[in-house]
Amino acid sequence: MDDSPHLQDFILVDGIDQIATLADEGRLAILKSLAERPKTGAEIARELERPANQVHYHLGKLLEQGLILEVGRGRKRWKEERYYRPAAQHFVVDPRVGCHHQETSASLTRSIESAFLDWRREELLKIDLAEVARRVVQDSLRARPGEKILVIHGTHGMDLAELILVELQALRCRSHSRLWSYSTIFGTLNRHTPESLAELEFIAPEVDDGLDGVIFIASNVPEGGPPSPEQMAKLPLLLESISRWHHSLLARRVRYVEFALPARRGFAYGTITAEEAVSVFWQCIQVNREELTKRADLLREVMGDNPRLRFTCPKGTDLTLEVDLARAFVLDGQVSPEDVAAGRLFEGLPAGTLNFFPIPGSANGIYHGDYTFHGGMHVNDITLQLNGGRITEVSAPARAEIIRQRMEHSAGDSNLLSGVRFGLNPAGRGPTGMPVLDACLAGTVTLHFGNNELQGGDVRSTFDLTLPAGRMTVESGARQLVTAGTLAE
């Protein structure tokens, strides 16, 4: 009966007519009734003991403002009946309606989004954040008593960071935390000169000395406005200080786990709703490592000893490159002793990719990515021209300049292809709008540009670009590894 769009967790009501429609006791009673299950006007009238014509009038007003949806029709004797349900489980008045200070209203909106993100995780998906913290500390980082562990997080990841610190304390680790938010970044850029940034130590020596592991809770959703021209000019120097620190972690064999925390607006792009995308994310976190290994082994078997790959898609991709078969690896969410011995100190959650380093200079042709996410904005339908393994041209219907500017303001090999990934995780479908999540989903093919040293690679850069493609076909000689977004079986 119900073939309507997916029920949203909440809707921000921002129209005067919508607010006026909600400001009625009778209509609120109808919404409360419909929250139980889809119903007809006649059912609601009997339940609320209201005249049927009055209930149908209110249903018409709610339907007109998009607050309820018609989800099916049926017949009772000679009469056709229509079934309705709410457009969302909750309705919240948009802070911008009564708040004319842009930053304040944006902050309130972020709080609302975060609250409902937590509500879905806790109430609907039954995901315990404390259990997630234990998984990150014990399974992913594999922390041991007495080890010195640093937790880096922004304001968006405060709750998870606190639970990770609790877990580290319970394991008798020596833990430290470092706040790394947009306010911290912009404040650092404002406070320092270019000369002092060039000598900046990202982590204080007393914390950095003797580190055994790092947990970074990442979020690419901005908490404020874009950087000013002055800040943008100094940003590469700050990013270079982080790159130097990452390089030192590699030299010291310090294990590193990155948890890419989701934000609702990060799911703005895609063919599925934000609610479905959030569910896919948390399902992806509950990764089955045996299943990932099985899928990776199958792809390797199909490839055999042929390192040359060809990528094609209906949107114009025609790219050839060679990969280093000897250094292929699976990111399964756990830094194992074998990973450390091989010089791969990095793991990420969500997880589930078979990864290859490209042979330098071998990538030539055109690659079309579904999208990427930079500076709080999605850039859709990106086309890259690659020559000799480097980006020589970037185009997109809109916002391509975002990528070009980031490349221009980055240090190191910002235009160099550094990784090829095949998604293995069966958690769900995409695209979700979160590149690191989509890269893990089974059948997705992703090109990565940027630093890969912590994964055992040789590319140093402060630039980071992840370009997933969900309908790619990849051939290895006469065999197909991926066919229109479906893994070989």
Image: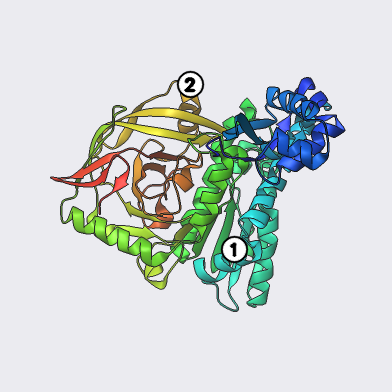
Q: Which mark is residue 132?
A: 1
Amino acid carrying mark 2 in the image? Ala
Residue 345: which quarter of the image? bottom left
How far apart marks 1 and 2 lie (CA) works out to 37 Å
In-front residue for pair 389/329: 329
Q: Residue at x 49, y 60 (%)?
A: 249
- Can residue 63 be seen here? The reply is yes
Q: Earlier in the sequence, mark 1 or mark 2?
A: 1
Q: Are marks 1 and 2 in contact (CB under 8 Å)?
A: no
Where residue 303 appears, x then y in whole percent?
19, 53
Task: Say which quadrant the N terminus sits in.
Answer: top right
In-front residue for pair 433/12: 12
Q: Is residue 248 left or right of residue 473?
A: right
| Label 1: how many Cα within 10 Å (few below 14, some 14–19, many 20+) | some
Q: Residue at x 43, y 64 (%)?
A: 288
Query: In terms of secondary structure, where does tag 1 sit?
Result: helix
Task: Say which quadrant the C terminus sits in.
Answer: bottom left
Q: Is residue 313 left or right of residue 171?
A: left
Q: Residue at x 38, y 34 (%)?
A: 369
Where residue 101 appears, x then y in whole percent?
81, 27
Q: Which mark is residue 398?
A: 2
In-front residue for pair 391/36: 36
- Can residue 210 be seen here? The reply is no
Q: Which mark is residue 488?
A: none
Mark 1 vs mark 2, foreground winner is: 1
Q: Is residue 362 left or right of residue 39?
A: left
Query: In terms of secondary structure, where does tag 2 sit?
Result: loop
In-front residue for pair 356/43: 43
Where residue 12 appears, x then y in whole percent?
72, 33
Q: Is residue 322 left or right of residue 443?
A: left
Amino acid carrying mark 1 in the image? Val
